[in-house]
Amino acid sequence: MLYIKNLHKSYQSGSKSYPVLKGVNLSVSSQEFIAVMGPSGSGKSTLLNCISCYIPFDEGSITLGGQTLKNLDADALARVRNEQLGFVFQDFMLLDGLTVRENVLVPRIIRDKVDAEANERADSLMSLFGIAHTADKYPAEISGGERQRAAVARSLINKPLILLADEPTGNLDSKSSRTVIEAFENARRQLGATIFMVTHDSCAASFCDRVILLQDGLVCDTLQKQNESQQAFQDRLLTAIKTMSSTK
């Protein structure tokens, strides 16, 4: 599904170059729920921005659904972002002047394809994520958890190959965070969604199939969920994070 090989990215400041990604290798299979964790400055956001084609990378390759993303022209990149990638951001990014239903339909509005199928899918997604009752409300009239679930529904309206989530529980309390993670789980289980989530939240990460630990621009460890409880996986994850921090 998603293959990243020897990914390098540096930022320039004057005459100096600051490497952020230093040869990242990873892959994500269809219908996996993956988390990426690491300290600030480890390259998590840069990695996500490279995958989403918002910033160019220096070396390596990113392949999504058999398509190489490097050197695509502006029109091709726009199609990839709209049709093959779904996005969920920490601050929801809903449009205040649109209802929840209209926000969910925004990617279809961009494509000028708000047909019967799109409306039916919007209704189905809102029902799946428990926000059907908010359809005619505006973002300011609903809770943070409901806004983020609306953002999840929006990210899936075009049936993307992969959903990219950037700190999706960062602005939420624990109860609302759980409802958002449950939305991801439902999307994977009932819609076959593939989810790639950057997070600082070990509790959220512990619901994933696999957690990739990033440090100093490299993958330093990968934890696969075994036949264990969510709490046991979280404990194992916290131990790995502590070990990673102590060896820096």
Image: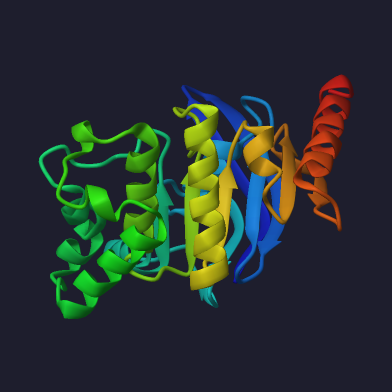
Assign the C terminus to one quadrant of the image. top right
**In the picture provided, is 182 more to the left or to the right than 24?**
left
Provide residue 33's location: percent of width, then percent of height.
Answer: 63, 57
Provide residue 247's location: percent of width, then percent of height.
Answer: 89, 24
Number of labels in the image equals 0
Is any part of residue 14 visible from this angle? yes
Provide residue 76's location: percent of width, then percent of height.
Answer: 32, 69
Assign the N terminus to one quadrant of the image. bottom right
Provide residue 88's location: percent of width, then percent of height.
Answer: 41, 47
Taking the spot 54% from the left edge, 47% from the top edge, the residue there is 181
Taking the spot 41% from the left edge, 41% from the top edge, the residue there is 89
Specify the color scheme: rainbow
**In the picture provided, is 156 more to the left or to the right than 207?**
left
**In the picture provided, is 190 more to the left or to the right than 133?**
right
| Depth check, front residue: 214 or 195 | 195
16 above or below 141?
Answer: above
Taking the spot 35% from the left edge, 41% from the top edge, the residue there is 146
| Depth check, front residue: 69 or 143 | 143
Is any part of residue 220 visible from this angle? no
Q: Residue furthest left?
A: 97
**In the picture provided, is 222 more to the left or to the right than 17?**
right
43 above or below 120?
Answer: above
**Residue 113's quadrant in the figure?**
bottom left
